Image (cartoon, rainbow, N blue to C red):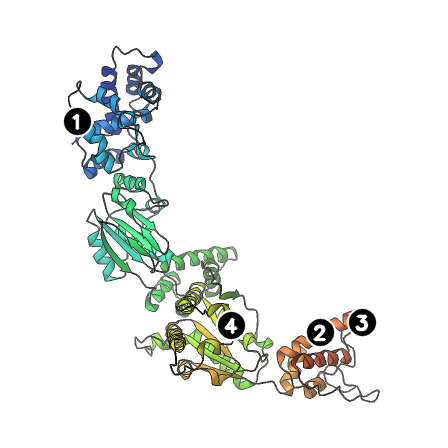
Amino acid sequence: MSEYADVSSACLSVAARLAAALTGVALDPADDPSVALLDLRRGTPALPVHDRAARRRWVRLQERYRLSDFEMDLFALAALPSAHEVFGPLFARLHPRRLPVLSAGLAARSLLDGAAGRVHLDEALLDGPLMSGGVLQADEAPYAQRGFTLPAGLWETLRGFGGDSPAAAAPPAPAVLRTPELELAKALLDRDDVTILLTSDDPVEVEADADALIRSSGRTPYPVREASPVSALLCTVRGEVPRVTVPAGAVDLGWLAGLRGPAVIVAPATAAVDAGARILFTVPLSAPALAERHATWQALLPGQEAAAWELAVQHRVGPVLAGRAHADAAAAAAVAGRSPDRAGIAHSLRRRAVVALPAAARLVHPSAGWADVVLPRPQRELLSAAVGRAHGQARVLNEWGLAGGRSGVCGVRLLFAGAPGTGKTLAAELIAAELGLELLVVDLSALVSRWLGETEKHIAAVFDAAERAQAVLFFDEADALFARRTSVGDAHDRWANLETAYLLDRLERLEGVAILATNLRANIDDAVVRRLEFVVEFNEPESPERERIWRAHLPATLPLAPDVELGELARLYPITGAVIRNAAVAAAFLAAADGGRVTQGHLVLAVRREYDKAGRSFPGPPRRRPAGQQSGVNGARP
């Protein structure tokens, strides 16, 4: 064990040996190491250490890298330019390439008695643990002309400065290990050559699990921002466990070769990690189960049992993101002098959801309400029942025990079937708005790929995005994906059936809300229909519904002429809500071009053009009524 208590006392000792070795050498008085030695001794109270941890780090450096006392002296000699400003110019004068760093010749002159021990010095500087462990760094030059320096940050770390990670500075969170595999990983952290790999698609929560794992073993986690051999060295000296987050794909952890202690790696489930010769133990972590999520919200919202269940069902988040969203909502609610509620927390969760949307999806903020959706009573009741099921499934499936531990029970899946323009998309927005969620609309043209296996990747990305964004998933024209499976005639049929099977599996495992819309219900595979909780038929509107749709698309701010009779338009023209909307907008532009109000003639002309666009036969204009018998906008005769 080195006789010195810390790096500063070691520097004082080797500086004295250097001063003795250079006695009689012609030097500039400003570069005299004896002067620097006196300065160091005068400043001893301030120089040696920043805290007692520095002494532990000096001992840890020697023990972990198995350095001899001679190698510790050699290290301290290389550290002198960091200890006092005189040693940089002095080392430069004595270096063959005039570099302000240690050379092999200066080390021999300072630490050896003549030529004795030169082989020992060469071994230390060529292939000893100082070099193999990265404790000293050498530049690219012939051996006699090389410069030997400390890695960036090592001097400050040994002095006791720096190295306070956010994870170390923050108040320790409860070290809760939620799986038996994590308990086994905790036991393995006693080894210096082990790498624990935690895989998950939720980086926020898995990083919290990694920190909890490290703290549970009595150690301090250190989030490594730039993985490098220097990072491994500094974590070893500080006695901390590096927690490294790596991206998807192939990951090389060769930089951990210089680490003398355990490491915890956080990676997506698809990452391929190469830990080299180190022991690798992998722990796959799934999203928290419903019971865990409910317990989290119960703790955050005491006395609000209904809100806790709703948040647990609708938002698949762990305790970290849940706590942050609760803090957001509490801060906003405090301004208004109230407590945080479910709506405020849900809003914060949506804002905090880090969602990189795939190319096949777009996020829509719904604004539709019940007044905007014109449907017959049975269809409205089905939509209302779907919303009620989404709100109440926590109580029915969990409190009342109807889930029975089976998968595919949670979640709400609906099929909207009907002709184009009958309100399927608007109804999807209504459901999302009623649940306080956003709508993730899937673009099937970007989802389906001709390349084998690509469609499944796109499907997985869409479902993952819906779960992260806490959004209602909406497949328009779903028969392109959920069509009836066919007999296998060639490889294309086989892959198409596999894609459908994969899609059914993801749909069944979805805990949120998914809506499938199709123009032809008969095209949807029967296996899909069996997995649905609701099937809503969207028929073309009858005359009373058409009149209500006309009124919905002609706002009170629109100037209407007295001859406008919406009841007559509704009776005469059997068109869908989308066509009525187009005709209402077109009539308003016709009226604006005329510089007047919207008349019955403008509306009829707009409807006629919609018939022409669709290639349908126009029923003809309304029969002209005698003067004084025109009906008003409200349908009442004067």
Dot 4: what SS? Answer: helix
- Whole-number angstrom distance, CA of label 3 to CA of label 2: 13 Å
Q: Tell which tag, 4 or 3, sits nearer the viewer.
A: 3
Task: Place residue 201 in its image quadrant.
Answer: bottom left
Which residue in the protein does label 4 denote? Answer: 434
| Circle nearer the viewer, 2 or 1 | 1
Nearest the viewer among 378 and 427 is: 427
Q: Which residue is mark 2?
A: 586
Closest to the observer, 293 or 534 = 534
Tell me the tag on residue 131: none
Image marks 4 and 1: residues in contact by CB distance under 8 Å: no
Q: Amino acid at mark 2?
A: Ala
CB within 8 Å, label 2 to label 1:
no
Distance of mark 2 from mark 4, alpha carbons? 31 Å
Of callouts 1 and 3, the N-terminal one: 1
Label 4 to label 1: alpha-carbon separation:
80 Å
Q: CA distance from mark 4 to mark 3?
A: 41 Å
Residue 594 bears which disc, if any? 3
Residues at marks 1 and 3, CA–CA distance in whole angstroms = 102 Å
* Three-letter code, disc 1: Val
**Callouts 4 and 3 close, C-beta under 8 Å:** no
Question: Which one is nearer the viewer's eye here, 448 or 471?
Answer: 448
Query: Marks 2/1: CA distance?
Result: 94 Å
Q: Amino acid at mark 4?
A: Glu
Q: Is residue 591 left or right of residue 146?
A: right
Q: Position of residue 458 (x, y in %)?
A: 43, 66
